[in-house]
Every structure is written in structure tokens, then in C-alpha cells.
Amino acid sequence: MAVPKNENCFKIRQATSDDVEEIWKIVKQEGWASCSFQVTRAVIEIAEDGWFVAEQDGEILGFVMGYNINETTSFPGFLIVKPEHRGKYIGKALLNEVGSYMGDRRISFVAILQVEPMYVKLGNTRSPRGGVNLYSLQLRNMPIPQEAKVDYELKDYIEVDWKDLLDYDTSFHIIPRERVLNVWFEIPESKTKVIQQNGKIVGYGTIKPVPSGHVIGPLYADTTAACMILLNYFATAIPANSKVLFTMPTASEDGKRLLEYNKDTLIVVWKGVFMEKKQAPSFSKLHKVVAIFDSAICFL
């Protein structure tokens, strides 16, 4: 559908590295607690030419991202229009542009409940994957069975075989995400730990600072003990009483344990749902996911 002409005569163009500072400024003003300048820059690097901005007289009014991970699957996100410029068809123009970029690929993304109706009107549906919420809490040490402490070994991601780690991630996502992981793990000040049992990877997670505290994501683990060991490491790796944010699927089994154990400091920042157009890639191990990358860049 053609976007009606607007008296403000904004234009849509591909974003460049020169736009990172302004994009981050808008993200920060919008209050996206789980984001940071470093994360924003990393996502721009991952998506490459899939970033688009709406611009008028040199001012960025809004932007959107679309990442074509392969010939059949795309992941849109980071749709923001400045509040004072909403209602001017800018969001629709951005969605049309990124839609053309993604083409006929199947897509998957996260929408907070307040904007779900808008995406339904655009032809998207709720995914069978269910809900996903952003939580904030002060992370406490989690109880671990004594025998589990002997069986598991925690390592930095550079200490394990890269192919083994990529294969483990692909066991969740089906689609290999080598480019995504390469960029994500190298975000400055982030820490990525891998947990092994008898030499086999059974989980991994990343923590990184953001202006509002720290964000954990992703965090995947095959067993409860592996999950708790990862969480306990992250609890000791940050200042005491630091706010920690998780974008967590409601299907997460160990995530429910985490929320219950930290319920005295738990805050639900927002509630959302996984959405898709066409059938999104399968995700049979979603119940073992404590945290995805981020709601804006879930890459699921």
C-alpha cells in the first residue's frame, strides 16, 4: 500500500555508521531499559544494510531494523518514531521499506501487548511460542545441589571449541547464527560464559552493562543446575544490588524458578508476545531458554 504524502516531506534512507549516535539518543529517550549504545551499535553491525531511517532536513525522525538471516527468514525490530512526529505516516513508511527489504521471507519478532493490534492489522499473528516478558530484579545466589558442583565446569566462551558452541546454539534455533554470536560476544564489557558437563556444552549466557544496570541475554541451559551455576556466576560478576534485566519467554521452566526466588525485588517492566508472519522457525527447546537476546532483536 502506498504511503500518503506528508506535508513534512520526510524521506526514508538506509542508515549508516554516522547515524549510530542519533539512533542511540532516540532509543535512550524512549526509555528502552535493556539497551545501550554498545548494544545499538552491535545490532546495526549485525543487520548491516537492513537499517532504515526517516529523515527530514537532516533530522532523524524514526528508524527500523530488518535482519535477513538467510534466504527464507528475517527478523524485524527497533521500530521507533519520535513522539512529536507520530501520526504522520512515518512508522508506516518505515514498515513498508523494511518489508520490501525482507521480501517474502517468513518473519518472527516480539511485540509488547499495547502494540500487538497494530501488528495484527499488518498481517502478523501470535506465534505458538506464546508470551515473553521483560523483568527487572536484584539477582541473588540460587541454590545448587551439592553434587552438581562437581559435575559442571564453567569456562569463558573463547576457551571452548567455537563449532561446538555454534552447534549448541543451533540446537535451540535450528538456523545457524554465527554472525550474530560473533558480534554479540564481542560487545565491550560483556561477559559470555559456557557451562560444560563431562566436556559437553549444556548451557551458555551473556551479561553486559546498560545505563539502568545489567542485562542477561541470551541464557540457555539444558539442566536446572547448569542454569543456576550460570546465574550465580553473573550474580557475583556485578555490583551488589545491581538491577538485572531479562527478556524471558513465559514457557521458561528455570525462568519461573528464578522469578520465584527473587520475587522480593521482581518488577515486570512490560508484557509481550512472540509474533510471526508465515510459520516461524521451530523452537522446540524454548522451555530451556531463560533469556533471549532482547525484545527488539530477538533473532528467534
Image: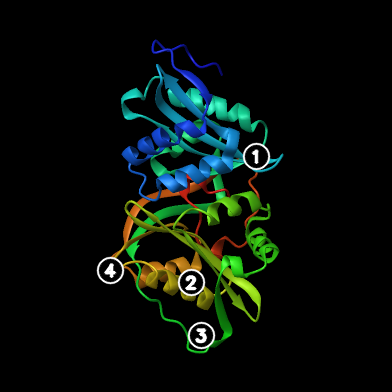
| Residue 83 x %, y % | 32, 29
In the rendered structure, are the residues bearing label 4 and label 1 in contact, judged by CB atoms less than 8 Å apart? no
Badge 2 marks a residue whose secondary structure is helix
Q: Which residue is mark 1?
A: 106
Q: Say which quarter of the image contains residue 58.
A: top left
Mark 3, residues whose alpha carbon is within 10 Å: few (<14), some, or many (≥20)?
A: few
Let me know if residue 221 appears in the view: no
- State how far apart marks 2 and 1 are (Cα): 33 Å
How many discs mark residues in the rendered view?
Answer: 4
Please give the label number shown on residue 192.
Answer: none
| Residue in the picture at 61% in, 27% down | 100
| Residue in the picture at 35% in, 29% down | 82
Q: Earlier in the sequence, mark 3 or mark 1?
A: 1
Q: Say which quarter of the image contains residue 201.
A: bottom right
| Residue 115 x %, y % | 42, 37
Q: Which residue is mark 2?
A: 230
Q: Which residue is mark 3?
A: 149
Q: Which residue is mark 4?
A: 264
Let me know if residue 260 appears in the view: yes
In the rendered structure, are the residues bearing label 3 and label 1 in contact, judged by CB atoms less than 8 Å apart? no
Of 114 and 72, nearer the camera is 72
| Residue in the picture at 50% in, 34% down | 17
Q: Earlier in the sequence, mark 4 or mark 2?
A: 2
Residue type at numbered disc 2: Leu
Q: Earlier in the sequence, mark 4 or mark 1?
A: 1
Q: Earlier in the sequence, mark 3 or mark 4?
A: 3
In the rendered structure, are the residues bearing label 4 and label 2 in contact, judged by CB atoms less than 8 Å apart? no
- State how far apart marks 3 and 4 are (Cα): 27 Å
Point out the frontmost of discs 3 and 1: 3
